Image (cartoon, helix red, strand yellow):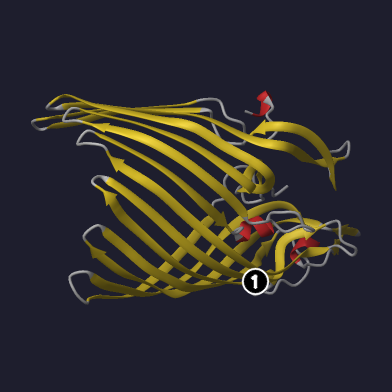
């Protein structure tokens, strides 16, 4: 029947980038220096796939008639292409004198891209296929500017206070059509992309580091981190609802011991999220994972590390993380299907309460034994990862 099961011989994934950079550094004095970088990156790529029994209307193609039968689906080969330009400038002005180390800087960048798709072959097609036929196109632009100031000051022997203040502004614009067909629209059509959003983020960070003596040190910190959605978050999400930016409050403290033959450390953390973009176990049609906003969630845990120099030629390092990663008051949205497994393009809500975050194991451990003896350099590395959920439902069957 012409369908391809498994690999398609001419399936390909191609992408190239050309990078240009201009670097400038100047030392004004022993305590002042400046660095400036101008950059530009040109990119182009595409991948080609064989698709079985695809609805022609999804590719802006008309059904055709053969043997008194109207053909609405066909096997075809498509290309999805992207051309991009990324350019901008970054700078930093630095001052270091005695106990004070400061830096101010920033940057401004623009990223533009054109996403479009072509159908290059259709099995037994009776119509006319233009070699340059495009079935979707969208143009995107992202302007990203930031300024920051950071400082580290030794207030007492071995005690350092540090702070980092950053402001970011992002303008995000996407216009055109996505390659996803909106079956819920009337009349049906490709998903319309009309994104025009602005984001402003203030991300402060502060902490203290204490070098107690040669062997012992401790630290504590607090940080705010905010991040805008990616293009995939827009194109893979719901047609009627755009993703939100995520925000994290990060609290951490730790202790480290070092000697000639032993190192040990412990780090305790708590990350409080608002609108975290978490993977939900679903994949888009090219196999990329899809993320969704969850209103309230957190990640907390303890990280332990231990390293021992057993002899002059043998060392053993181990580390492990115990964590609890939870979504609070989670509601799952399930796609509805009829008895023949045809998607109905409606959803059923299911309230699940507190659930584990997908792809977030409660324990990970690593071990590295390294031998360096005369002409021999041998290492043995092992890793253990506990059971983890493949979606956010918390179901054991989906883990």
Q: Is residue 236 visible?
A: yes
Question: Where does the image place residue 298, in percent across and percent down from the top left?
Answer: 60, 38
Q: How many marks?
A: 1
Image quadrant containing the C terminus? top right
- Name the residue at 8% across, 31% down: 374
Residue for badge 1? 173
The answer to whether residue 67 is visible is no
From the viewer's perspective, tell me whether residue 239 is left or right of residue 115: right
Q: Is residue 328 above or below residue 225?
A: above
Q: Position of residue 271 (x, y in %)?
A: 54, 41
Q: How many C-alpha atoms fall within 10 Å of the one at disc 1: few (<14), some, or many (≥20)?
A: some
- Foreground: 246 or 20? 246
Quadrant housing residue 148: bottom left
Residue drawn at x 50%, y 32% is 301
Q: Kindly identify the residue that appears in the image at 59 percent across and 52 percent down.
A: 247
Q: Is residue 195 left or right of residue 323?
A: right
Instruction: Tell me residue 40's x, y (percent).
Output: 42, 75
Q: Residue furthest left?
A: 374
Q: Is residue 348 left or right of residue 397?
A: right
Q: Position of residue 145 (x, y in %)?
A: 50, 71
Which sits in the foreground, 275 or 30? Answer: 30
Q: Is residue 139 above or below residue 362?
A: below
Q: Nearer the viewer, residue 207 or 7?
A: 207
Determine whether the residue tagged by mark 1 lies in a helix, strand or loop.
Answer: strand
Residue ID at (41%, 48%): 207
């Amino acid at each position: 029947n012409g369908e391809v099961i498994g690999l398609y011989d001419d399936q390909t994934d191609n992408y190239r980038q050309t990078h240009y950079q201009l670097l400038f550094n100047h030392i004004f004095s022993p305590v002042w220096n400046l660095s400036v970088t101008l950059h530009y990156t040109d990119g182009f790529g595409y991948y080609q796939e064989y698709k079985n029994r695809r609805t022609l209307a999804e590719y802006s193609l008309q059904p055709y008639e053969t043997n008194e039968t109207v053909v609405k689906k066909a096997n075809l080969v498509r290309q999805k292409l992207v051309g991009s330009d990324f350019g901008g400038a970054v700078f930093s002005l630095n001052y270091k004198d005695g106990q004070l180390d400061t830096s101010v800087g920033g940057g401004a960048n623009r990223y533009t891209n054109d996403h479009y798709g072509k159908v290059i072959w259709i099995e037994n097609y009776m119509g006319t296929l233009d070699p340059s036929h495009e079935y979707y196109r969208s143009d995107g632009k992202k302007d990203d500017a930031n300024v920051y100031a950071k400082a580290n000051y030794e207030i007492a022997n071995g005690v350092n206070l540090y702070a980092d203040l950053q402001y970011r502004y992002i303008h995000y614009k996407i216009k055109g059509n996505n390659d996803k067909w909106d079956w819920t629209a009337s009349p049906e059509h490709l998903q319309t992309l009309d994104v025009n959003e602005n984001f402003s983020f203030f991300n402060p960070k502060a902490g203290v580091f204490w070098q107690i003596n040669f062997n012992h040190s401790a630290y504590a910190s607090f940080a705010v981190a905010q991040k805008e959605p990616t293009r995939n978050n827009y194109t893979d999400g719901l047609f009627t609802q755009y993703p939100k930016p995520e925000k994290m409050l990060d609290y951490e403290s730790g202790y480290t011991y070092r000697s000639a033959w032993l190192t040990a450390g412990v780090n305790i953390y708590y990350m409080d999220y608002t609108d975290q973009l978490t993977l939900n176990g679903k994949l888009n049609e090219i196999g990329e994972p899809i993320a969704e906003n969850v209103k309230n969630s957190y990640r907390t845990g303890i990280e332990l590390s231990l390293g021992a120099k057993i002899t002059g030629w043998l060392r053993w390092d181990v580390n492990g993380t115990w964590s609890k990663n939870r979504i609070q008051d989670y509601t799952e949205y399930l796609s509805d299907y009829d008895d023949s497994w045809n998607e109905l393009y409606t959803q059923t809500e299911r309230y699940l309460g507190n659930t584990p975050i997908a792809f977030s194991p409660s324990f990970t451990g690593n071990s590295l034994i390294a031998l360096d003896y005369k002409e021999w350099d041998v290492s043995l590395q092992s890793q253990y990862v506990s059971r983890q959920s493949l979606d956010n439902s918390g179901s054991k069957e989906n883990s």
